[in-house]
Image: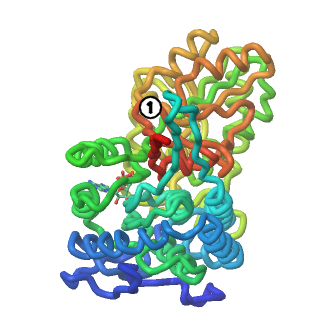
């Protein structure tokens, strides 16, 4: 790994606690980070627990008060510097990301720039945390609303976007004047650590951004939710773990930002531009090898274009190149773990046993390991597992539908409500369908909806809170009003 980098110091095998890079855990335990493309161990990290986490929280608690007292412009300056460092080091950060997570290098670079865009955006927003004045309710009363940072924020992030999922939590927190203790997924901690190093170089003060490395996520989650210095927990991951954290946080009425699972419908109406819909399905379904919470999970295609769509999509999907993310031209890397491969196989065999057909792919790739063939299933029906559960892999199940009413009912028939997509050229249908879909995000004639300027987030069991846009910083702010009698 080191030989591939311009700046090898970006690969770090230590945690960042209270401004110190810590090489060993209190227990002396460690864990390995492996490259999912070949199983090689690329780093060994200290496996920390509650005591180290509590030390980081104490440091964050002290440092936050000093950080919050700075002007928005000062905090903006530091984030601007961090943004520039991320862009300048994007190739190295992408290499580290591909090495620990497996996605193709070009996608990894895209993720770094996407993560950096949140740092740039929230740095700019740091100067615009405006309050309000409200006409008094009595002649002698003046009412002033101010916005203040929540305080110490804990963050738990997943492996599928090891840089961007953390950057879009850390940036608004730091911009608002909060301090953060983060616990990256044990599969992909290196990207978080290199981000923390760049933050340190950019001038983020000691204690403001901590990274606890640990394999024991449930212990760290308990410290995060039970330590009363922590005022907010922001989490991106599965709905099940989100529920556990919400229950744990209930005792201290912890504020929660939750970006949880999705089960995105992708609807193609008869009047759609079919080629555009196929392009959209490719990026929405197969980006990151199907391992994003906004990936199309259920593709609903209207009867009049079903066969044509399936054929065009199959032509593209069967031409995808599967392999190590460092190989030129690869557009699907390995899946993250054996368990991920097992889930994909289970979803396919369940569908096939209930009558679905494999149009392309359908089995582990001949390269072995964690590689899997990009797959399309046709003749999929609502009684199959793929209709209800997030596959989180390269499988596109194609359902056939007849009417708008029917597809909206099927699309909404899930406890999830994160992303949704549809293709149509009819303006009134576009508004009708967009308003009827019970989702936090709707892509219309596009399969790619993520940007720092828009509010990312879900409804129903897909979570609460929004990341990005002018709304994103609100998640790290408390409102206080002063009632003044003159
Ligand atoms: P994924 O399917 O993406 O692995 P998880 O929800 O299991 O989704 O993991 C997302 C993050 O949550 C990871 O950082 C993981 O270590 C962490 N995590 C998993 N279980 C718990 C838990 N009980 N408490 C706190 N964090 C957890």
Front position in the image: 465 or 438: 465
Circle 1: element type: strand
x, y percent for residue 68: 48, 66
Identify the residue position indicated by label 1 in the image: 416
Front position in the image: 292 or 88: 88
Is the N terminus in the top left, top right, bottom left or bottom right quadrant? bottom right
Query: How did the renderer colour the structure?
Result: rainbow
**Height in image: 39 above or below 457?**
below
Residue found at x 28% / y 80%: 30
**Figure quarter occupied by ligand 1:** bottom left
x, y percent for residue 337: 40, 59
Left-right relation of 390 to 71: left
Residue found at x 51% / y 50%: 147
Q: From where the camera sits, is residue 377 visible?
A: no
**Height in image: 120 above or below 455?**
below
Residue found at x 39% / y 86%: 20
Which image quadrant for residue 347? top left
**Height in image: 478 above or below 90?**
above
Left-right relation of 300 to 424: left
x, y percent for residue 205: 49, 79
Left-right relation of 42 to 278: left
Q: How many other residues sit within 10 Å of disc 1, few (<14), some (14-19) or many (≥20)?
A: many
Front position in the image: 186 or 58: 58
x, y percent for residue 482: 46, 44
Number of numbered discs on residues: 1
Q: From where the camera sits, is residue 302 visible?
A: yes
Residue found at x 53% / y 22%: 411
């Amino acid at each position: 790994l080191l030989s591939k980098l311009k700046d090898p110091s970006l690969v770090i095998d230590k945690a960042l606690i209270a401004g110190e890079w810590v090489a060993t855990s209190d227990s002396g335990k460690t864990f390995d980070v492996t490259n999912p493309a070949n199983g090689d161990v690329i780093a060994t990290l200290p496996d920390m627990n509650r005591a180290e986490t509590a030390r980081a929280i104490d440091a964050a608690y002290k440092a936050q008060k000093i950080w919050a007292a700075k002007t928005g412009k000062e905090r903006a300056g530091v984030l601007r510097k961090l943004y520039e460092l991320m862009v300048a080091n994007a190739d190295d950060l992408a290499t580290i990301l591909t090495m620990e997570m497996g996605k193709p290098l070009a996608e990894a670079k895209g993720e770094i720039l996407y993560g950096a865009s949140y740092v740039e955006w929230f740095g700019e927003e740091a100067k615009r945390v405006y309050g309000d004045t409200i006409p008094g309710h009595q002649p002698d009363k003046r009412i002033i609303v101010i916005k203040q940072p929540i305080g110490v924020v804990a963050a738990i992030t997943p492996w599928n976007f090891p840089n961007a999922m953390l950057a879009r939590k850390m940036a608004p927190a730091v911009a608002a004047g909060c301090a953060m203790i983060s616990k990256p997924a044990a599969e992909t901690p290196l990207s978080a650590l290199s981000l923390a190093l760049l933050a340190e170089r950019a001038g983020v003060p000691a204690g403001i951004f901590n990274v606890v490395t640990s394999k024991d996520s449930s212990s760290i989650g308990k410290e995060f939710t039970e330590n009363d210095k922590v005022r907010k927990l922001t989490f991106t991951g599965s709905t099940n773990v989100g529920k556990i954290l919400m229950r744990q946080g209930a005792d201290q009425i912890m504020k929660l930002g939750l970006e949880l699972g999705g089960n995105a419908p992708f609807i193609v109406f008869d009047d759609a531009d079919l080629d555009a819909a196929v392009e959209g399905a490719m990026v929405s379904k197969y980006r990151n090898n199907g391992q994003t919470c906004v990936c199309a999970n259920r593709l609903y295609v209207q009867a009049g274009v079903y066969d044509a769509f399936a054929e065009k999509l199959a032509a593209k999907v069967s031409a995808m190149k599967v392999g190590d993310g460092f190989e030129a031209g690869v557009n699907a890397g390995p899946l993250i773990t054996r368990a991920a491969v097992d889930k994909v196989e289970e979803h396919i065999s369940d569908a096939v046993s209930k009558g679905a057909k494999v149009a392309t792919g359908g089995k582990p790739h001949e390269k072995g390991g964690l590689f899997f063939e990009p797959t399309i299933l046709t003749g999929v029906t609502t009684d199959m597992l793929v209709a209800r559960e997030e596959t989180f892999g390269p499988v596109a199940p194609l359902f056939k539908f007849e009417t708008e009413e029917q597809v909206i009912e099927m699309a909404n028939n899930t406890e999830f409500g994160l992303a949704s997509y549809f293709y149509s050229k009819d303006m009134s249908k576009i508004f009708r369908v967009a308003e009827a879909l019970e989702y936090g995000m709707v892509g219309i004639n596009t399969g790619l909806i993520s940007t720092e300027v828009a509010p990312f987030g879900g409804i129903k069991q897909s979570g609460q809170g929004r990341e990005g846009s002018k709304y994103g910083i609100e998640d790290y702010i408390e409102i206080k009003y002063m009632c003044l009698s003159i």
